[in-house]
Amino acid sequence: MSQLVKNIIRFICFILMQVYVLNQVPPLHQFVTPYLYFLFILWLPFSTSRFALLLISFVFGLTLDYFSNTPGLHAAPCVLIAYLRPFLINLLISQEGAELNYAEPSIKSLGWAPYSLYIFVFTFIHHFYLVFLEWIQFGNFLYFLGKVIATTGISLLLIFITEMLFFRKQKFRTNTAL
Amino acid sequence: MKNIFVFIRRYFNFLFFVVLQISSLILLVKYNESHQAAYSNIANEMIGRINLQYNGVQSFFQLKETNRQLAAENARLRNSITDNFEGADTNRVAVLDSLIRDTLGRQRKYLWLPAKVVNNTTASQTNYLTLHRGAKQGVQKDMAVIGPAGVVGVVIDVSDNYSRVMSLLHRNSKVSSMLKKGNITGSVEWDGKDPRFLTLRNIPRSIKVAKGDTVLTSTYSANFPSHIMVGTIDGIAADPSSNSYTLKLRASTNFYSLQYVNVVNNVQWDEQRRLEAVPEKNP
C-alpha cells in the first residue's frame, strides 16, 4: 500500500475513533478525557516536508474541531507539535540515516527509549497547550494542572495499547534501493 | 526588497507555523464570542450527515429507554388533558388546534417542533447536540430545546437540514429558572463536573429551600416557555461571598439517552425584542 493511501485511511480512522468512540466514553472524572487522535501526526512519514506537515496537521485538527464544535481548539496544538516534530526527530535519531532506512517513526526505526521519549514529549506538549487554551476560557488552575497530568497519563496508556495492537511492520530500506 | 524575499524564504516554515497558529486562535476566539463557526453551514451539513449514519446504528440500542421516556411523557400529557378535569355540571368542550389564534382570542406564543438527536456529547466541558432539523424546517438561532423530561439547551447554529444545540451541560449556558414554591427566580448553570448535576445561583438566603424542591424555567425567560422542568434540589450550600445560595440540582433530563427533543419557537419574541431594543426615554 502506498504511503499516501495508508495515511488517508489513518486520517479517517483516527478521526472516527476519536469522535465516535473516545469522545462518547462516559466521563469518569472531569479531568479524564481520552485523547488518541494526535498519534496520526506522530506517525506521519519522515519524508513529509515541513510545509506539508504543518498543513496536514492543521486540516486534521480542524476536522476534529468541526465534529466537536470547537473550531481552533484542537488545530492549534496539532500545528504546534507538527512544527516541533522535525527538531526532536533530528535530536533523537541515533544511527546515521535512519530516516532514510525507515519510512516513519516507530519503535523499530528509532529504538525503544528514544521512541518512548518522542511520544511522551509530544503527548505532554499537546495536552499542555490544549488544556491551556481551555483554561483561558474557564479559568481554574487546579483544573489545568490536574487535567494535564491525568490526560497525559490516559493518552500514554492508550498509545501503548495502540502500539501493541497495531504493530507496524517496518521494512528496512537500503540506500541503494532508493 | 530582495532582502525581504530572502527573509521570507529562509523562515518560511516558521512564518507559516505562526500564520496557522494565529488563524486557529482567531477561529477559537471568534467562535466563543458569537458561537458561529466559519464555514459552519457546509461543515454542519457534512458532519450532520456522518452523524446521522452513526446514529442509525447507535439509536437501535437505546430503543427501550426511548420508549420508556415517550410513554412517561405521554402519560404526563394525558393526565393534563382538560377532559380529565370535569366538574359535576359542565358542558365545556376542549378543542385542540394549531391555529395562530384560538377561540378565546388568545395569540399563539410557542410552537413546538419535534426533532431527532443525531449526535450528543456529555464527556467534555463544552457539550453540544446535533439535531436532524434545520433552517428549511423552521429552526432558527436562539430557539429553546426541550426533551421529554425537561430543558436540554439552546440552538446556536443552523444549516439547511441540521442544527447544533449548546447543551445545558456547557460552561457558557445559562437558563433563567425559578423555584416552583414561591416563584423565586435564579439562574441555572453547569460547573463542568458531573453531567447529572446542575447549579442554581442567585436565590436569596432569606428564602426557605428544602431538598427535593422542584425548579422550573422562569416566566422571564424569552426563549423557554415558563414552567418547564429543570431539576430538583439535591444539595444546599450558602455562598459566603454573597447573600444567596448555591444550590445543587439533579437535572431532570437524562443527557446520556436523548433520542428525540422538541425545538420551541417563540413566535412573539421578535415583537418583544424590538420593543426592548428601543432605548428608554425619560419623561
Image (cartoon, coloured by chain):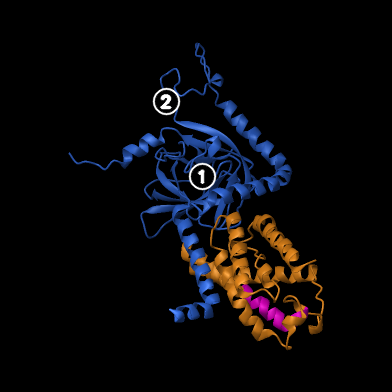
Chain colours: A orange, B blue
Which amino acid type is shown beneath numbered disc 1? Val
Q: CA distance from mark 1 to mark 2?
A: 24 Å
Magenta segment, which residues?
A: A108-123
Please give the name of the residue rendered at 50% of the width and 64% of the height, measured from the top-left corner: B23
Which amino acid type is shown beneath numbered disc 2? Gln
Q: Quadrant of residue A50?
A: bottom right
Magenta span: chief secondary structure: helix
Q: Nearer the viewer, residue A157 or A83?
A: A83
Q: Secondary structure at mark 1?
A: strand
Q: Chain of mark 1?
A: B
Label 2, on which residue? B107
Residue B266 visible? The answer is yes
Please give the name of the residue rendered at 77% of the width and 67% of the height, measured from the top-left corner: A2
Residue A78 rendering spot, x and y as whole percentages: 59, 68
Residue that lies at the very extreme toward the left in this rendered image: B283
Label 1, on which residue? B155
Badge 1 local density, few (<14 within 10 Å), some, or many (20+)?
Answer: many
Q: Chain of mark 2?
A: B
Q: Is A178 drawn above or below residue A66 in the view shown?
A: below
Q: Is A34 drawn above or below residue A98 in the view shown?
A: above
Residue B95 rendering spot, x and y as whole percentages: 52, 18
Q: Quadrant of residue A84?
A: bottom right
User: Is residue B89 toward the left or the right of residue B280 in the image?
Assistant: right
The answer to whether residue A117 is magenta is: yes
Please give the name of the residue rendered at 75% of the width and 68% of the height, measured from the top-left corner: A3
